[in-house]
Image: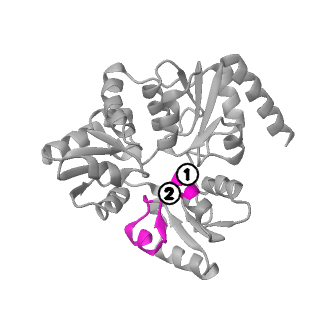
Amino acid sequence: MDNLKQAREKIAKLKEELQAVIVAHNYQRPEVQDVADFTGDSLELARKCVGIEAEVIVFCGVRFMAETAAILNPASTVLLSYPDAGCPLADTIDIGSLRQWKHRYPDAAVVAYINTTAAIKAESDICCTSANGVEIVNMVPNGEILFVPDRNLGHYVSTKVGKKIVLYHGFCYVHDSVTVEQVMLARQRYPQAKVLVHPECRPEVINLADAALSTSQMLRYTRESSCKIFLIGTEEGMLYPLRKQNPEKEFHSIVKNFICTDMKKTTLETIVEVMQARGNVVTVPEEISVKAKQAIDKMLAIP
């Protein structure tokens, strides 16, 4: 605990020296979320980064998130909290593959999940998150949509809209690992619980849930619900803000050790190291940044 206290004190001092703001995703470690000025899901953090006035943004998350921050706030220096914190889902698609799919479906609008590299966003018509995917697809005028790269989120969206959705074959290894059997066993243990899962889960898992929600939507749902027990089907870092916001309610993970290893690479110590060195600077080439920003801005233009 003494080490944590010392790290928190160093971070507070470095924030003043660098005129820095720290943002953290909801999947980060509890102690990392506690030192952040802002926490949230991908959509919330993207919106927040637009208006941040700081010399430095320390992004506690994974690389595609830091890229988005750098695109939306070019006046700030963006530091990623761990050098190789990536996203295996984002890595499931590359530019060559996307261009082949665009050639195969020339009439389709490309809707890119925010969990993609800046280069993929630059090749897309518009971005979306798990919170607004349905709304974005409904808004796009095209009747045919090429949804990349998450097949599970894309399938979920397809059940809510009246359009032809072409699904790319990517997936999040964390959410895709949840099984029907695990959900049923969890329900047996907590029969009074509401089951909330992420839209990146498999369709058959979503069908068993009471709701499929982004992390920000989970926070809102549990705050407003009269239910006292919840089973959560997303990365276990989400349990911390849920319990913090609702101390009178119970939250249990559907799966034990439900961890995204990349999200857990960041520690208070790595934050200190990054800030001291002013290292892990995330930049995006201008020709990519300009095009990617167009796709992101179209998304952010929707309230």
Do labels 2 and 1 touch, CB within 8 Å? yes
Question: What x and y, as percent, mark residue 216?
Answer: 53, 51
| Secondary structure beneath label 1 | loop
Q: Is residue 187 left or right of residue 99?
A: right
| Tag 2 residue | 174
Label 2: element kind: helix
Residue 92 numbered mark, or none: none
**Side of 244 where 91 appears, left or right:** left
In the image, residue 264 above or below residue 164: above
How many marks can you see? 2
Residue on which the image places disc 1:
260
Q: Is residue 209 magenta?
A: yes
Pick the front one: 180 or 228: 228
Q: CA distance from mark 2 to mark 1?
A: 6 Å
> Which residue lies at the image location 80% right of the left edge and 30% below the top edge?
9
Quadrant including the C terminus: top left
Q: Which residues are magenta?
A: 199-220
The quarter holding residue 83 reads: top right
What residue lies at 77% left-to-right and 27% top-to-bottom? 10
Q: Position of residue 247 (x, y in %)?
A: 73, 60
Which sits in the foreground, 178 or 208?
Answer: 208
